[in-house]
Image (spheres, rainbow, N blue to C red):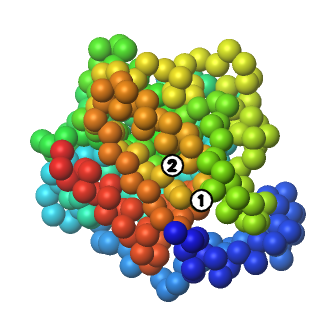
Amino acid sequence: MPIDPFIAGKLHLLDGATWESAHDDPVVMERVAEFNADPGEPDTPDVGVEERTIPGPHGDIPIRVYNPLGEARRALMWLHGGGFVAGDLEMPESHLVATELAARADALVVSVGYRLAVDGVRYPVPIDDVHAAWHWLTEGDGSAYLPSGAVALGGGSAGAALALSTAIRLRDRGERCPDALLLAYPFVHFPNPALDDETAAEMRSLPAMLRITSAGVAQMVRNYVGRITDLPHDALPGAARLAGLPPTAVMLSEYDDLRPSGELLAAQLEESEVAVTTYLAAGMLHGHLNRTSALKEVDRSLDFFAGQLSCR
């Protein structure tokens, strides 16, 4: 289907804009903020939120614990995206998603502020942080929070890669694995597979700020791993052995340069005899969970993940 009409009506705001100009020019930043604003105030569910700091192998790790108003019946550890170099517990893909899934799925949700690949931090430090948070939740002090139901692990974009990498590490070490994986628009391959011709043609008219170029992908990998050759299999885990992983839900954004990575991952999981369910968020751009449920497709996407959690 076409790009969501609400988003399409705002594309002109990004004409000529770049991330560099947005940082340097307040007028461009205002246009970017206007583009990112959804209709009306978000109707955020009422859930309990607790700020915590937990120990990790590289220092303390900030987390947020979200509790539904009623009894939590299941749990999810959730990881924001941001290309391994950006993002935090405040961004919508972290805070709003955790809030919504806690309410919609009657789930305890733990959002993890893992270390970003900046100032000399590289792979495997972010995975180490997620691994430590998983142990805190499933075996450490955090286990006191756990309901009796399933415990899932998930994330968006780079966070989806970290979730998959952590699950692979847990499987290989014989440790407790998640009961399910929830992966939103995952970036898990390098080189990134190419778009199909039809989608590529439709995306050529998008503002440059909304595209993820091959050079941009390479830079993400360099920032994260330090190189683009001889990559460890669990850094961009589409190259890893996937057999033996838990049931996985893969959400795709329709107009997304990274969509082919998610599509290839779903095919790889199926070939590896891992139960996989895919969902295409029609008309959406990469990172659409950073928008609010005021957009119908974001609402449907949150319901998809909530349904995947609730069936565990």
Judging depth in this view, the residue of 294 and 275 nearest the camera is: 275
Q: Residue 25: x percent and y percent? A: 87, 69
Q: For mark 2, does the 10 Å Cα neighbourhood hold few (<14), some (14 to 19), or many (20 or more) residues?
A: many
- Total marks shown come to 2
Relative vertical location of residue 227 with respect to residue 37 in this rendering, above or below: above
Q: Residue at x 58, y 71 (%)?
A: 3
Q: For mark 1, does the 10 Å Cα neighbourhood hold few (<14), some (14 to 19), or many (20 or more) residues?
A: many
Q: Residue at x 55, y 34 (%)?
A: 188
Q: Residue 220: x percent and y percent? A: 70, 38
Query: Would residue 282 appear left or right of 10 to someone viewing this image?
Result: left
Secondary structure category for the residue under label 1: strand
Q: Which mark is first along the chain, 1 or 2?
A: 2
Judging depth in this view, the residue of 256 and 166 nearest the camera is: 256
For the C terminus, the image quarter is: top left
**Residue 141 visible in the snapshot:** no
Q: Residue at x 62, y 72 (%)?
A: 36
Q: Residue 104: x percent and y percent? A: 26, 64
Amino acid type assigned to the residue bearing label 1 in the image: Tyr
- Using the numbered discs, state the Cα–Cα distance from disc 2 to disc 1 in whole angstroms: 11 Å
Find out whether the residues at labels 2 and 1 contact each other: C-beta distance under 8 Å: no
Q: Which residue is mark 2?
A: 185
Q: Nearer the viewer, mark 2 or mark 1?
A: 1
Q: Which residue is mark 1?
A: 255
Q: Quadrant of residue 142?
A: top left
Amino acid type assigned to the residue bearing label 2 in the image: Tyr
